[in-house]
Amino acid sequence: MTDLTDLDHAHAAMEASPEDDTARLRFFERLADSELFLVLEAEAEGDVIRPGLFDVEGARFALVFDREARLAEFAGQVTPTAAMSGRALVALLDGQGIGLALNPDVAPSAMLIAAQAVEWLAQTLRQGPVAAMARPVEVAAPAGLPEALIRGLDRKLALAGALAEAAYLVAVTYDDGSRGHMLAFVGARAGAEQALATAAGEALTFSGIEAGVMDVTFVASDDPITTRLARVGLRFDLPLTVRVAEPGAGPAAPGMDPDRPPRLRQ
């Protein structure tokens, strides 16, 4: 099979190393970042959806696929669906006692994800950044950081879209003598700070580093420190990856508008 998705690859790595917590975290990160297609019991009523559920040994599962073609292959007929990110879906199902049947019978990543795992992922994704006050007095090249974190940041920030001009990872010393690592976003778009800080935090969380801490800050393009950051920091680019709706396009399908997440009806 050549038409493999990110979820297929992450699932294979997790299955190959069942004791590897990092591989398992990476799979759940891919699940959160993927666009998923949820099978519905009936057509959506506005932003209210009713997922099609089935029972396995007394547990309830919703059917989801990471490609429309896989859903069509499984269903064999036109089926009501809702498309949304994995993070939106687990937030929707959190606390409902509903697991996920992922790609059943149509992909190597086919598996049942228990309701407890869905709730864990939803709760993990809700952990936002914590504001703190400290003044950097020195920045230097980063050192000693796990490769898993570097790869995680590179992927997460590439998915973030052009919300900033760039980001630099540096070692930092603060005015109180404390030291650590800091990710500095340069030229962030107005209002994008929370999303960028969350993306950076998730990269750290899903890298598997226990008790890891990474500070996040935002600087203007013409701030004097930007030149120093560019000189010593590890640069991450944030390419434009998001799709922009065409003017005059019709209403978005349930789950596609982040400002109007779908509501669940069982």
Image (cartoon, grey):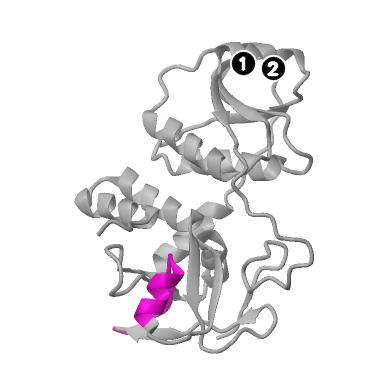
Amino acid of disc 1: Ala
Residue indicated by mark 1: 230
Whether residue 67 appears in magenta in the rendering, the answer is yes
Which residue is at a point 56% across and 17% down the rendered structure image? 233
Left or right placement of residue 65 versus residue 88 in this view: left
Dot label at residue 83: none
Three-letter code, disc 2: Thr
Residue 52's x, y, as percent? Answer: 47, 85
Q: What residue is at 78 percent from the left and 18 percent from the top?
A: 222
Q: Which residue is mark 2?
A: 226
Picture coordinates of residue 202 (x, y %)?
52, 44
Q: Secondary structure at mark 2?
A: helix
Q: Are marks 2 and 1 in contact (CB under 8 Å)?
A: yes
Furthest toward the left, the residue is: 16
Vertical order, 41 against 236 (above or below): below
C-alpha distance separating marks 2 and 1: 6 Å
- Residue nearest the viewer, comparing 247 with 12: 247
Up the image or down, 253 lies above or below 188; here it is: below
> Is residue 98 rendered to the left or right of residue 140?
left
Query: Magenta span covers which residues?
Result: 57-74
Mark 1, secondary structure of its residue: helix
Quadrant of the image occupied by residue 248: bottom right
Judging depth in this view, the residue of 201 and 43 nearest the camera is 43
Residue 150 at what x, y percent from top left? 44, 30
Residue 158, image x, y percentages = 54, 40
Q: Image height check: is 197 above or below 139?
A: below
Horizontal side, residue 209 vs residue 178: left or right: left
